[in-house]
Amino acid sequence: MKKTLVISDRFPLPEKSGADIRTMNLARYFASLGPIDIAYLSNLHSGSVHAEGAEEDFEKDDIFSGKYRLQKLEYPSSLRGRFGISVRGFPYPVREYSKASMEKLFSLIESGGYDYVLVRYLRNTGGFFGLSQIAKRKVIIDIDDVLTHSLYDTLFAPTNNALRMLFRTINKVLLAYYQTRCVTVFGACLVCSEKDKSDLWGERASESTFVVPNTLGTRAPGELRMESGFNRRHVLLFIGALHYQPNVSGLLWFLESVYPRYRNVYPDAVLLVVGRCPLPEVIEVCDRTQGVELHPDVPDVIKYYRDCRAVIVPLLEGSGTRLKVLEAALLDRPIISTKKGVEGLDVVSGVHFLEFDDGPSFCEAYRTLSDEATYDALVTRAENVVLEKYSHSTLSTSMSKVVSYIDFKSSEFSSLFSRSHAPAG
């Protein structure tokens, strides 16, 4: 029996976002090895429970034995304060835990009897360099998004202020150093794709960095069979967290640069925008754009998949792999995506999805779906590649390599430590 502690931004039930799904997929793997506890920052429920029977599902899915609430210190409001904590070893978005939370975490990790400590996201590792060498060997950081590439600028609001731009440049250098240090100091680091691994390390990839692909959560393949969307009217679906900046910027770009041309060709077209916590600019643009329906914070997205003919993924930035692409593939809807939207997935344009980069190419891609045989073939091939390469068994196989590596290195380190402290003679 192995014991695991998960450290997360929020309690990941119910699974209402891609972040929660990945957290729970990893947690369920560790639960198959033994007891699992969680330390988290936000309220117990990551979202309200609306659906009938959802409380029972919550209790059934709650696999955590121990639960510990954490707090972080407020991020400084002044530029001087931000410079200070970045230079002191906490480059944004890494933030310090409160003194009480830091003491609790150190006590749990050092003395709680855990074999593995899974930390979701680099930003939740603040202060962990102070752990003992033995404790550091237990720590597995799920980097998920590589923040020092195209995602970095999305962490901040646009500015022309020279001092703020200087801070962001310096912070990025410090964040890259912090990221590299995490990879070299802790037991293992996880990324979602080979592309992210290359972004993180280039050709010098560390043996402690593992690709653990995203997989879907509680919906098993074939659990929800969908009628074909071929005969649906010209309804498109965008789905994703509407406070996550890559989603927001991609959606706004689509509405401003692509959707008007599509509506000119198909005047009865509708775009369903579905997601959590829409930012004010998302609400405003959806309200003023004809043929757009905003559906925020829905309890289940299945209805919207049933109503659409195709799913769009208009991302221009970001990393990781897109759970929305995997879900669309398993729910029998073709995917029209930018190149960035499917980055990290082993899919080919024209085989598993249709690629676009502007209004004309989107309309051309959509016209391809007017042929029913082409429509069905895209759906079938996308589903097959997801079942083959992004299944729960794939995640389990990948994670088995991670824990075997951690076990070996921990045993090796303990042996060296014991020999170095053995009495002479």
Image (cartoon, helix red, strand yellow):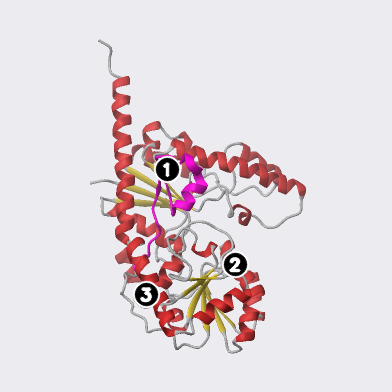
Q: Is mark 2 on a helix, strand or loop?
A: helix
Q: Is residue 218 left or right of residue 183?
A: left
Q: What element carries label 3?
A: helix
Which is closer to the viewer, label 1 or label 2?
Answer: 2
Give me the disc on residue 105: 1
Residue for badge 2: 250
Circle nearer the N terminus (1, 3): 1
The structure residue drawn at horizontal position 28% and vertical position 27%, both measured from the top left corner, is 415
Extent of the magenta region: 189-218
Residue for badge 3: 380
Is 273 located above or below residue 99 in the figure? below
Q: Position of residue 323 (x, y in %)?
A: 44, 65
Question: Residue 103 versus residue 116: which sits nearer the camera?
Answer: 116
Is 217 located above or below residue 31 in the figure? below
Taking the magenta stretch, the answer to whether it contains residue 194 is yes
Label 3 CA crowd tier, 10 Å (few <14, some 14–19, many 20+): some
